[in-house]
Image: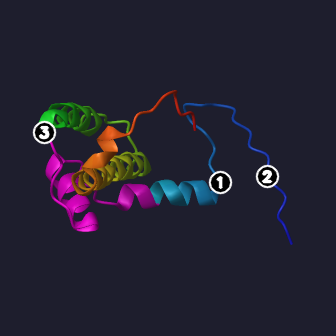
Amino acid sequence: MAREPEDITIEDLARPVLSDLQQGALDYGESLELELSRESILEEAMAKTGLSDFGPDDYLERLDLLLDEWNSDAGLTGIGRLSLRNKLLLFACNRLLIRDTLEKHPEIHDIEIERPIIV
Protein backbone atom coordinates (compact mmCIF):
# COMPACT_ATOMS: atom_id res chain seq x y z
CA MET A 1 0.00 0.00 0.00
CA ALA A 2 1.37 3.39 -0.98
CA ARG A 3 2.32 5.81 1.77
CA GLU A 4 0.85 9.27 1.76
CA PRO A 5 3.49 11.98 1.44
CA GLU A 6 4.14 13.92 4.60
CA ASP A 7 3.84 17.69 4.62
CA ILE A 8 7.10 19.53 5.06
CA THR A 9 6.87 22.76 6.99
CA ILE A 10 9.91 24.99 7.30
CA GLU A 11 9.63 27.72 9.88
CA ASP A 12 13.31 28.66 10.22
CA LEU A 13 15.79 27.99 7.42
CA ALA A 14 18.74 28.56 9.75
CA ARG A 15 17.49 25.96 12.24
CA PRO A 16 15.17 23.55 10.41
CA VAL A 17 13.29 20.89 12.35
CA LEU A 18 14.33 17.56 10.85
CA SER A 19 12.57 14.22 10.90
CA ASP A 20 14.41 11.25 12.38
CA LEU A 21 15.17 10.03 8.86
CA GLN A 22 16.59 13.39 7.78
CA GLN A 23 18.67 13.70 10.94
CA GLY A 24 19.91 10.13 10.46
CA ALA A 25 21.05 10.97 6.92
CA LEU A 26 22.94 14.02 8.19
CA ASP A 27 24.50 12.04 11.02
CA TYR A 28 25.57 9.33 8.58
CA GLY A 29 27.18 11.95 6.33
CA GLU A 30 29.11 13.39 9.25
CA SER A 31 30.42 9.92 10.14
CA LEU A 32 32.05 9.50 6.72
CA GLU A 33 35.72 10.19 6.22
CA LEU A 34 35.85 11.57 2.70
CA GLU A 35 38.95 12.79 0.98
CA LEU A 36 38.34 15.60 -1.47
CA SER A 37 41.67 15.59 -3.28
CA ARG A 38 42.78 15.42 -6.87
CA GLU A 39 44.71 12.20 -6.25
CA SER A 40 41.87 10.33 -4.53
CA ILE A 41 39.32 11.19 -7.21
CA LEU A 42 41.55 10.45 -10.20
CA GLU A 43 42.86 7.22 -8.68
CA GLU A 44 39.33 5.99 -7.95
CA ALA A 45 38.21 6.88 -11.49
CA MET A 46 41.11 4.88 -12.92
CA ALA A 47 40.31 1.93 -10.65
CA LYS A 48 36.61 2.02 -11.61
CA THR A 49 37.21 2.20 -15.37
CA GLY A 50 40.50 0.35 -15.75
CA LEU A 51 41.70 3.32 -17.82
CA SER A 52 44.44 5.86 -17.14
CA ASP A 53 44.56 8.33 -20.05
CA PHE A 54 42.80 11.54 -19.02
CA GLY A 55 44.14 13.38 -22.05
CA PRO A 56 45.46 16.95 -21.79
CA ASP A 57 45.87 18.06 -18.18
CA ASP A 58 44.44 21.55 -18.69
CA TYR A 59 41.53 20.64 -16.37
CA LEU A 60 43.75 20.00 -13.33
CA GLU A 61 44.13 23.64 -12.29
CA ARG A 62 40.35 24.11 -12.35
CA LEU A 63 39.84 20.86 -10.44
CA ASP A 64 42.30 21.97 -7.77
CA LEU A 65 40.60 25.36 -7.40
CA LEU A 66 37.22 23.67 -6.97
CA LEU A 67 38.59 21.21 -4.42
CA ASP A 68 40.31 24.00 -2.48
CA GLU A 69 37.03 25.89 -2.31
CA TRP A 70 35.05 22.88 -1.13
CA ASN A 71 37.69 21.85 1.40
CA SER A 72 37.65 25.34 2.92
CA ASP A 73 33.84 25.47 3.22
CA ALA A 74 33.18 24.92 6.94
CA GLY A 75 29.43 24.82 6.32
CA LEU A 76 29.56 21.90 3.92
CA THR A 77 27.92 18.84 5.48
CA GLY A 78 29.19 15.29 5.15
CA ILE A 79 26.30 14.46 2.80
CA GLY A 80 27.20 17.55 0.77
CA ARG A 81 30.84 16.45 0.57
CA LEU A 82 29.75 12.95 -0.50
CA SER A 83 27.48 14.34 -3.19
CA LEU A 84 30.12 16.69 -4.57
CA ARG A 85 32.81 13.99 -4.50
CA ASN A 86 30.51 11.56 -6.34
CA LYS A 87 29.90 14.17 -9.06
CA LEU A 88 33.63 14.73 -9.54
CA LEU A 89 34.20 10.98 -9.65
CA LEU A 90 31.49 10.65 -12.32
CA PHE A 91 33.06 13.44 -14.38
CA ALA A 92 36.54 11.88 -14.08
CA CYS A 93 35.21 8.46 -15.14
CA ASN A 94 33.39 10.04 -18.08
CA ARG A 95 36.56 11.84 -19.17
CA LEU A 96 38.45 8.54 -19.19
CA LEU A 97 35.67 6.73 -21.08
CA ILE A 98 35.27 9.48 -23.68
CA ARG A 99 39.03 9.65 -24.22
CA ASP A 100 39.15 5.86 -24.65
CA THR A 101 36.24 5.88 -27.11
CA LEU A 102 37.86 8.62 -29.20
CA GLU A 103 41.15 6.69 -29.25
CA LYS A 104 39.41 3.51 -30.41
CA HIS A 105 37.16 5.29 -32.91
CA PRO A 106 38.94 8.38 -34.30
CA GLU A 107 36.42 8.44 -37.15
CA ILE A 108 33.99 10.03 -34.70
CA HIS A 109 35.78 13.32 -35.34
CA ASP A 110 34.83 13.11 -39.04
CA ILE A 111 31.08 13.03 -38.40
CA GLU A 112 29.53 16.33 -39.42
CA ILE A 113 26.72 17.63 -37.25
CA GLU A 114 24.50 19.79 -39.43
CA ARG A 115 22.29 21.24 -36.73
CA PRO A 116 22.22 21.22 -32.95
CA ILE A 117 21.22 18.10 -31.10
CA ILE A 118 18.98 18.97 -28.17
CA VAL A 119 18.40 16.32 -25.57
**Callout 3: 10 Å neighbours few (<14), some, many (20+)?**
few
> Label 3 belongs to which residue?
57
User: Where is residue 56, by image quadrant?
Assistant: top left
14 relative to 27, above or below: above
Could you tell me which residue is drawn at 44 percent across and 61 percent down? 28
Q: Quadrant of the N terminus?
A: bottom right
**For the view shown, which residue lies furthest in the top direction?**
115
Q: Tag 2 or tag 1, which sits nearer the N-term?
A: 2
The Cα–Cα distance between marks 1 and 2, rounded to whole angstroms, is 11 Å
Would you say residue 103 sits in the magenta stretch? no
Q: Which label was assigned to residue 19?
A: 1
| Secondary structure type for disc 3 | helix
Are the residues tagged 1 and 2 within 8 Å (C-beta)?
yes
Label 2 sits on residue: 6
What residue do we see at 24% from left, 56% from top? 100
The local crowd at label 2, few if under 14, some if 14 to 19, many if 20 or more residues have their Cα within 10 Å, is few
Residue 54 painted magenta: yes
Q: Nearer the viewer, residue 44 or 18?
A: 44
Q: Dot 1: few (<14), some (14–19), or many (≥20) neighbours within 10 Å?
A: few
Q: Nearer the viewer, residue 13 or 2?
A: 2
Q: Report the amino acid beneath label 1.
A: Ser
- Point out the tag, 2 or 3, that comes first from the N-terminus: 2
Secondary element under disc 2, as helix, strand or loop, is loop
**Where are the magenta residues, as a range?**
28-56
| Left or right, residue 18 beside residue 115 | right
- In the rendered structure, which disc, 1 or 3, sits on the residue that comes first in sequence? 1
Vertical placement of residue 63 versus 92, above or below = above
Residue at x 62% of width, y 49% of height: 18
Spatial CA span between label 1 and label 3: 44 Å
Task: State the image coordinates of residue 17 (x, y, percent, origin top left).
Answer: 63, 44
In percent of width and height, residue 68 lies at: 20, 34
Q: Which mark is residue 49?
A: none
